[in-house]
Image (cartoon, rainbow, N blue to C red):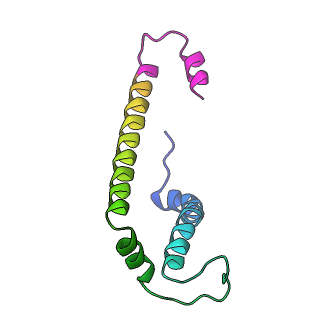
Amino acid sequence: MLQVRRATLVAYLLPTLIVVALINLYPIFYTLNLSFTNSSTFHYSDYTYIGGTNYSYVISQVGKDFLQVLLLTAVYVVACVGIYVSLGLVTAMALNHPRLRLRGFWSNMLI
């Protein structure tokens, strides 16, 4: 079997990991940064930092309804992730069963 040093693997994988991390993390941090400003459609370029005022406004004005919707969203996310992970695991186990006929066909149908 081919022996590859760990440093070589890191050297090949690091640029890809950095690009993927930037593509995924930049929008998250940018949105979080914008949430602490008064930026809107009307003054997009001349915004100022207002701290947690947006968050306190949402919690104080919406109150109980906001927290209920937030809880339902969290329950929905947990349920969906659980269902999709379970279905994926069952599908993977079925496709790897040794007595499965037409494995190539079923793998292609899954794609």
Residue 58: image quadrant is bottom left
Q: Residue at 43%, 22% (x, y): give it.
A: 96
* Up-down relation of residue 36 to residue 104 (above or below): below
Asked whether 98 or 64 is in front, the reply is: 64
Q: Which is more toward the observer, 83 or 3?
A: 83
Q: Is residue 63 left or right of residue 24?
A: left
Q: Is residue 23 left or right of residue 71?
A: right
> How many numbered marks have been drawn onto this rendered protein structure?
0
Q: Is residue 99 magenta?
A: yes
Location of the C terminus by quadrant is: top right
Q: Position of residue 55 (x, y in %)?
A: 41, 76
Identified at 55% across, 74% down, the residue is: 30
Q: Does 44 lie within the magenta span?
A: no
Instruction: Give the residue displayed 41% in from the left and 77% down from the top.
Output: 57
- Could you tell me residue 85's position as x and y percent? 39, 37
Residue at (56% x, 23% y) in the render: 107
- Residue in front for this viewpoint, 21 or 66: 66
- Please, is residue 39 above or below residue 77 in the view? below
Name the spot of residue 77 as percent of width and height, x first. 39, 47
**The quarter of the displayed image where residue 11 is located:** bottom right
Which of the pair 62/3 is nearer the observer?
A: 62
Above or below 79: residue 42: below
Range of magenta residues: 94-111
Q: Is residue 93 left or right of residue 50?
A: left
- In the rendered image, residue 54, in percent from the top left (x then y), is placed at 45, 78
